[in-house]
Image (spheres, coloured by chain):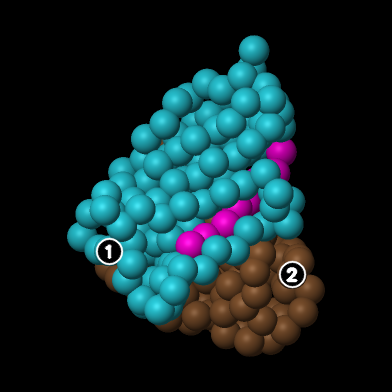
Amino acid sequence: DIQMTQSPSSLSASVGDRVTITCQASQDISKFLNWYQQKPGKAPKVLIYDVSKLGAGVPSRFSGGGSGTDFTFTITSLQPEDIATYYCQQYDNVPITFGQGTRLEMK
Amino acid sequence: QLQQSGPGLVKPSQTLSLTCAISGDSVSSNSVTWNWFRQSPSRGLQWLGRTYYRSRWFYNYAPSVKGRLTIKSDTSKNQFSLQLNSVTPEDTAVYYCARQYGPFDYWGQGILVTVSS
C-alpha cells in the first residue's frame, strides 16, 4: 500500500492567513494526487485534483503543487468558511489511500 | 446524485449490506468507477473497493477487507451494493459510496453503521 503522510495534523490560523499543508507519498505517485475538504457530518468534497487542477466551483484561493512524492496544498487567504478537515489522497495504485487529515481551526 | 440505503445497526458476525442508487449517470458507464469508503475516528478515511465496466465488469478490494467484502453492480436498478461479512465492532463507521471520474466527485450522503449486539 502507498502510505500518505500528511502534516500538520492540526493547525490554528486567523482570517486572511496563508495556510499550507504538506503530504508525502511513500513512493512516486506521479500526478495522481487529490485534496479534499470535509466539514462535520458531510462527505468529502474535492478541491484540487491531479496535483494542481481546481475542482468545479472551487475558489481560486485554494491551490496545490508538487510532484513525485512531495505535495503541498495552500489557502492563500483563509476565510471563516474554510474551517474544516483537509485530506490528501492518492489514486496511482489500489488500494486508494488518504492522508490522516489536517484539522484547520480559527485562531 | 448518489442515494445510499441500508440498516444503521448490525449484529456482530452478521452481514452488513448497503446500496447506492445512481441518478444522472449509469453504473455501466465506461468512463467512471463506483466506490465504497468508510470513515471512523480510529481508521480515518478508508477506501474499501470499487466496481467499473470496461467491456466487462471489474472489481477491486482493499486488502484489509478482501475475503469479507463483495461489491455488486445492478444494471436493471442502476445501483451498486456492498456486502461485508462477519462484521465486528471494528467495522463500526460511516459508510460512503462515491463516483470516481478523475477525483471522487460525487458522494452519497453517508450512513452510520454500528456493529453491536
Question: Which class describes the residues within 10 Å of circle 2: few (<14), some (14-19), or many (20+)?
Answer: some
Q: Tell me the residue that label 2 is attached to.
A: A2
Report which quarter residue B3 is drawn in: top left
Report which quarter residue A70 is drawn in: bottom right
Q: Secondary structure at mark 1?
A: loop
Position of the C terminus of chain A, as image quadrant, is top right
Report which quarter residue B42 is drawn in: top right
Q: Residue furthest right?
A: A26
Q: Of discs 1 and 2, which sits in the foreground?
A: 1
Start-end of magenta stretch: B42-51
Give the colour in which the image draws chain B: cyan
Q: Tell me the residue that label 1 is attached to.
A: B26
Give the colour in which the image draws chain A: brown
Can residue B47 be seen here? The reply is no
Label annotation for residue A32 = none
Q: Residue B82, image x and y in percent? A: 50, 45
Q: Residue B49, image x and y in percent? A: 57, 57
Q: Are marks 1 and 2 in contact (CB under 8 Å)?
A: no
Can residue B112 be seen here? The reply is yes
